[in-house]
Amino acid sequence: MSDGFHYELRARCTTSRARLGTFHTPHGPVETPAFMPVGTRATVKGVLPRDLREVGARMILANTYHLHLRPGEEVVRELGGLHAMMAWDGPILTDSGGYQVFSMSELRSIDADGVTFKSVVDGSHVRFTPERVVDIQRALGADVMMAFDHCPSVPTDRREVSAATDTTHRWLERCVRRYRAAGGEAAGQALFGIVQGGAFEDLRAASVDAVCAHDLVGYAIGGVSVGEAEDLIRSTVACTTHRLPEDKPRYLMGVGTPRDFFDAVESGIDLFDCVTPTRNARNHTAFTSWGKVNVRNQGFLRDRGPLDPECDCVACTRYGLGTLRHLCTTREMLGGMLLSLHNLRFFHRLMERVRGAIVGEEGGLEALRGKVLERSERRVGVDERVEVWRG
Amino acid sequence: MSDGFHYELRARCTTSRARLGTFHTPHGPVETPAFMPVGTRATVKGVLPRDLREVGARMILANTYHLHLRPGEEVVRELGGLHAMMAWDGPILTDSGGYQVFSMSELRSIDADGVTFKSVVDGSHVRFTPERVVDIQRALGADVMMAFDHCPSVPTDRREVSAATDTTHRWLERCVRRYRAAGGEAAGQALFGIVQGGAFEDLRAASVDAVCAHDLVGYAIGGVSVGEAEDLIRSTVACTTHRLPEDKPRYLMGVGTPRDFFDAVESGIDLFDCVTPTRNARNHTAFTSWGKVNVRNQGFLRDRGPLDPECDCVACTRYGLGTLRHLCTTREMLGGMLLSLHNLRFFHRLMERVRGAIVGEEGGLEALRGKVLERSERRVGVDERVEVWRG
């Protein structure tokens, strides 16, 4: 392994499989468990880099699929790579495009060698193979690249899941070969493998064995939270995570509610990403310590108090809820911008508290979980707002 | 006059009527000549307050008309006033709504007492009178309020201009009476009178006399740049400005190109406002030292260099032009946000240089004018870009 990438296990939780660690990368360390904001087309929507850093972000994501379509990976390379384009000197991870290719099932056809899909930009045909996906991510220049995987559309259809998992393993083999031929980690980028296997414990176990045989820098769990029931997500993540090697970072892809975080952290997950905070913000939904808030609620018209009295973000410390409501109802850009900063701060602050609780702060992880989830999952309105002010 | 408001004349240009000054307000001083960004609905579109401060903004605007419709001035008052809503501790000015009322001529009817117009939000009938406009601006709480004026739609129709100017004077009388009855400047807000008179020097002169008879904190020139020829704008501003008292700030409303600034500054204008920088930014047009740039130009696809090598804003120091183009063509919020910061910085930096040139820097105002206008007014593309890099 190069000096660049290294997972350091710093502490274990005494009541669960949760762990505190540091993922060292060529662009600096990431304290884990960590949430990674999504910057689909080389921008976390509506957020300037300095503000992104200030809400607590360390490692951020960008999407291979979207950047391949526009502006194209060779253009990204000529523009100095993703770090230059995103004006971000911290670590960056690119997904493999696998998820988008499969989530747009009507636009693609799959064969043993790869996937052909229709561009959402201009309708042209685009071809992704494992080799091509590695090449694209090399050009994008993120710290961490993801292997090209096949995410089955229904995690409970054993025949489909089994075939997709086999494909994932064959494609991983080809990704690794291409990756190593181009210099591997010594070239400054890490490759993470992705475990599939749907909702079947034996297929997940076999997938862990096949994927981890490649001795990569880190491993991800894919194919989770694609429509299956919540307890199935939880059991799948739990049975997969504890089989992953202890000395490598573990990344649960695309999972994004506070409850999901607690479940996954307790299983030993280190990294998360999701569009939840920014997408909800642009739709004017805020995550707060007192519940999920539709900021456009008419009942907040004259509300001078902060959106979330427990939050230290710019939206909560400099603006009243009534002003945020005004900015959202009049569709001002600033409304979505401020709520994006707030939601991102809420997620990062939650992860800070989770990291503290793993080593016993706030009464430990189980106590923090109860305290946070009891309130944060509620859809709340004006009545609950009154409670906030009564304290 | 209260301690709160005071115009301090600090230096005069030796080659024109330009002057360097400081406009002292209860929310701090403004070095003049100054450009004021427009925050129509209590937000400069797409710009956070800290960034607004950093591009050089000191005094900003908000619009009475739009804020009366949403959220309503009583709500603004309950939310702590405009300074709280805009998270802005510098001075704020509100226009009187006069310009919007008259620019939306199909939606209003005018009588001797005031104006009735149809709300663009819900079609309801809204009534503005001079007294009401003062009351609304009292509730909004800006440092400077503007008198309710009648801006004629055609500045060269003498009969119409004459009638509108008379109306403006009668309404000003009523505004002043209402303003003084509510405590005048001692209540913390200044009232500026607005001079009308269209393109007619004698009507402008008479309007100056009528308006300045009220001995207000400052005076504005309205009804300029409403479609008339450029040399008519220049001569109107020149013949009006030099008649205004020397010991009061002079504000030219809604004027917004670099050439306009030079013309007006040379006539002795101190304050400007315009939506030009932010509106152009959202349409992806940038003002730069080498010309007006359509950032979406395909020729910039692979351009790693800064949008404007002479600019110190975040867009120019942290991003390449090709990245800005990518953000604009993919309609990412960040594109409009970064160009808004850039254009605002361009305008404020221009005014900084103008202030320096008034006291002889850069060879004086005439030399600066030549240097800036020669390039900044050009509509430029890739060919001119090559020139920039050749130097």
Image (spheres, coloured by chain):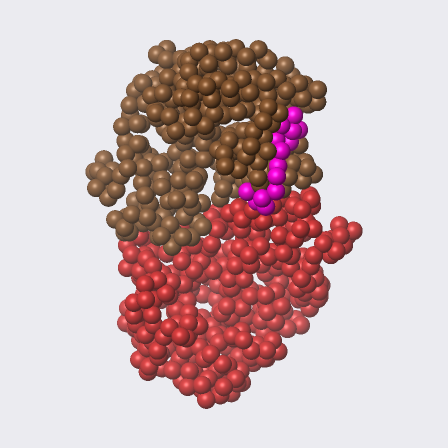
Chain colours: A brown, B red
Q: For residue A126: magenta?
A: yes
Q: Residue A349: percent from the left, percent from the top?
A: 40, 30
Q: Residue at x 60, y 57 (%)?
A: B285
Instruction: Please give left or right for residue A261 compared with residue B237 in the image.
Output: left
Q: Residue at x 31, y 37 (%)?
A: A292
Instruction: Please give left or right for residue B204 compared with residue A384 in the image.
Output: right
In the image shown, does B12 or A234 lie closer to the viewer? A234
Q: Quadrant of residue B280?
A: bottom right
Q: Residue at x 64, y 20 (%)?
A: A174
Q: Is residue B302 above or below residue A374?
A: below
| Region of the chain picked out in magenta, as a range | A120-136
Question: How many marks can you see?
Answer: 0
In the image shown, does B377 or B188 lie closer to the viewer? B377
- The N terminus of chain A, quarter of image: top right
Residue situated furthest bottom in the rendering: B159
Q: Is residue A300 above or below residue A355?
A: below
